[in-house]
Image (cartoon, grey):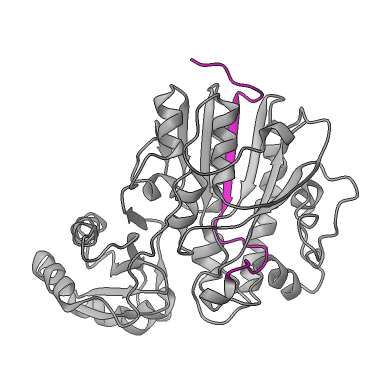
Amino acid sequence: MANYKKYKRVFGIVLDSVGTGAAADAAAYGDEGADTLGHVGMAYEGRLALPNLGRLGISNLRTTAIMGVPKASEPLAYYGKMAEISAGKDSMDGHWEMMGLPVKQPLATFPNGFPQSIIDQIAEFSGRRVIVNRPYSGTAVIHDFGEQQMDTGDLIIYTSGDSVMQIAAHEDVIPVAELYKICHFARTLLNGPKYIVGRVIARPYVGPDKDHFTRTANRRDFSLAPTGTTDLDRLHQAGYEVIAIGKTNDIFSGQGFDMSYHNESNMDGMDHVDAVMKGDFTGFCFANLVDFDAMYGHRRDPRGFGQALMDFDRRLGTVLDNLHPDDLLIITADHGNDPGFRGTDHTRENVPLLVYSPSMQESGSLGLRPTFADFGATVLDNFNVAKGDYGTSFLDKLN
């Protein structure tokens, strides 16, 4: 095992969709004015309570503090923001870029629905009719078509502004294993060369009727396999342990990980973080907490989003208490999903960057990092592993 420079264990926690203000290129995506954290704070009218994120410096990295979360006079962490260079604003784009593989060419999107040739092949493979096939909110589509799906056994296929195909079905009508099999087949149709789609997402739901349908934790992402070497691969090949918590495993198609944990919820994910922290390993734990995005961002629910942030903040206190002096914690996000914004899609925003270890004697600004890939480059630098073409380490700034 190669030696590490400063930290034996690095924990990266991605707060899925927790953006911190419109990126410089937001206009190209129709996202001028988006600000996930800012609008969540405004929805709470000064009562948003994030003491742990606050003392790390979550408001210090912003020009204007989050309402209710004052800037820390002496923040514990190094703080900053990261800008995205990938050609999209999906979770896959953000996570791949964090790990040194930005998506440089736009992936296919389908504002008018998927080509009939694709739909016909899915129908033939599954033996089921396909309904909807157009952009739709995930919760609205099961409200509007879920009862029909239960009655007929049809497949609900829909998309969004991102490069995704989502397939929804009631678990009592199409068992989860069958839905996964259908999604796996759909994945094979969308790997190119004509149509390249980032993710096919299984969206099972339960409930007796349209007013009581809920999506379940059996969601699964069938992502495009990484098109090149990622920083996860580099760490794994160098002999370090690489652990996935949440959908990070799916986003990278399992490549580069030694172990993975499926999350039922944000709190379940934090249980997994706590469990991994109790172990003795040398390497990188990469966690994603998706409820901010799936439960509140797309549903444009700023109050629910804020409550999820406060719930995370409480669990963050335990993480901070349990960090070893030779541990490093990096908290960031993969994109925005402003619940105070128009539409229901992700928003093109810069993302927060909070970096902390109990051994740090100083803190300060890391500025605006020009690419999410600085995250992975820093992890590689710590473990003396050569980086790829993207990213600049900020390890030497951490004192």
Left or right, 9 with respect to 122, comes to right
Q: Where is residue 214 in the image (x, y as percent from the top left)?
A: 42, 69
Q: Camera-side residue: 176 or 232?
A: 232
Q: Name which residue lies at 75% across and 43% down.
A: 78
Q: Residue at x 52, y 81 (%)?
A: 343
Q: Can residue 212 be seen in this view?
A: no
The residue segment tinted magenta is 1-25
Asked whether 365 or 60 is in front, the reply is 365
Q: Is residue 216 left or right of residue 100?
A: left
Residue 383, above or below 364? above
- Magenta region includes residue 247: no
The image shows a total of numbered marks equal to: 0
Residue 326 locus on image (x, y percent):
68, 24
The residue located at (58%, 65%) in the rendering is 336
The C terminus lies in quadrant: top right
Quarter holding residue 195: bottom left
Q: Which residue lies furthest to the front in this view?
A: 389
In the figure, 35 relative to 377: above or below?
Answer: below
Q: In this view, does 71 lie to the left or right of 158?
A: right
Q: Is residue 163 at all visible to an observer of this figure?
A: yes
4 magenta-colored: yes
- Magenta region, main secondary structure: loop
- Among the 4 quarters of the image, the one containing residue 157: bottom left
Frontmost residue, 387 versus 72: 387
